[in-house]
Image: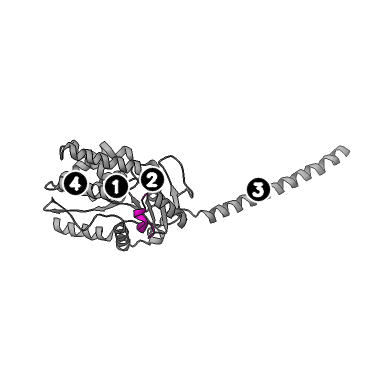
Amino acid sequence: MAALGWLTPRRRSATARSVLAGEASAEAARKTTQEVSEREPEFPVPGDERAAAFFDLDNTVMQGAALFHFGRGLYKRKFFDTRELARFAWQQAWFRLAGVEDPEHMQEARDSALSIVQGHRVSELQSIGEEIYDEYMAERIWPGTRALAQAHLDAGQRVWLVTAAPVEIATVIARRLGLTGALGTVAESVDGVYTGKLVGEPLHGPAKAEAVRALALAEGLDLSRCAAYSDSHNDIPMLSLVGHPYAINPDSKLRKHARRMDWRLRDYRTGRKAAKVGIPAAAGVGAVAGGTAAAIALHRKRR
């Protein structure tokens, strides 16, 4: 009995300590969960129909410039000669190495593309765009950015590409990636044939922001709940529109601006994640009102 009396207090004491440990652990877990929840609200928010995501294309979703890859595909189909191809190759090399858009190069590329497609049918270029995507673009999609877009889709949100690339090419890429659609530069066509002119101006810089603003109004979106993603400082106007701006593979100017504004950054070029990694909790849309108006005008012409 003496031995029993000696064991009982120890058994009770151990039980008390176990209870205390369990309660402390549960409280710590609850507190930690609460802190994490306060620090990182769920984003994208599932079922938020007034939220959407807008992605720049070149060097954000895809390595390099879509317009240059499109040029390679047209050269393969004998739309232009070797001299033009060399120029496309040089511009693409610059873009890949510098990681930024050169305004002069982009203007030359647009002018070349317009002259090349002049007289061709819109349907022909759309069909060729499907082939060029498979040949040159599919393998250049950044997996990390693709995952970000998919997260928005999985949350039931709409996702648009917003790019200065031709809207026909942008639409092909958006469809292949399972996105909602694309806003891009509109080339004029009459009776389904390209005239060699633009409708309005390229969807670039401030034009993207205007397009996003117009689309958000038309779709009933709340920009403060939207997200926007881009690599270029040229897209700061678009990124500044939304509640959740992201700098993806940013150029030096955008990186500095993003850090100053406490925006999220991700860099997939080296596998390195810059400060503030993770899908943020905010909104951003990028497209140009001018581009939207141009698309409407073009649609009317085609009718």
Image quadrant assignment for residue 213: bottom left
Kindly identify the amino acid type of the residue bearing the numbered disc 4. Ser
Kindly identify which residue carries mark 4. 112
Q: Quadrant of the N terminus?
A: top right
Local packing at callout 4 (Cα closer than 10 Å; few below 14, some 14-19, many 20+) is: some
**Residue 101 horizontal/vertical position (percent):** 31, 48
- Between 204 and 39, the residue placed more toward the observer is 204
* Element assignment for label 2: helix
* Element assignment for label 4: helix
Report whether 27 appears left or right of 85. Answer: right
Does the stretch in magenta take in 237?
yes
* Alpha carbon separation for disc pair 3 and 2: 38 Å
Instruction: Give me the disc on residue 25.
Output: 3
* N-terminal label among 1 and 4: 4
Q: Can residue 76 be seen at all in this image of the molecule? A: yes
What span is colored magenta in the figure?
231-242
Kindly identify which residue carries mark 2. 145
Mark 3 vs 1: CB contact within 8 A: no
Report whether 79 appears left or right of 139. Answer: left
Local packing at callout 2 (Cα closer than 10 Å; few below 14, some 14-19, many 20+) is: many
* N-terminal label among 3 and 2: 3
In front: label 2 or label 4: 4
Instruction: Give me the disc on residue 174.
Output: 1
Mark 1 vs 4: CB contact within 8 A: no
Q: Residue at x 43, y 39 (%)?
A: 270
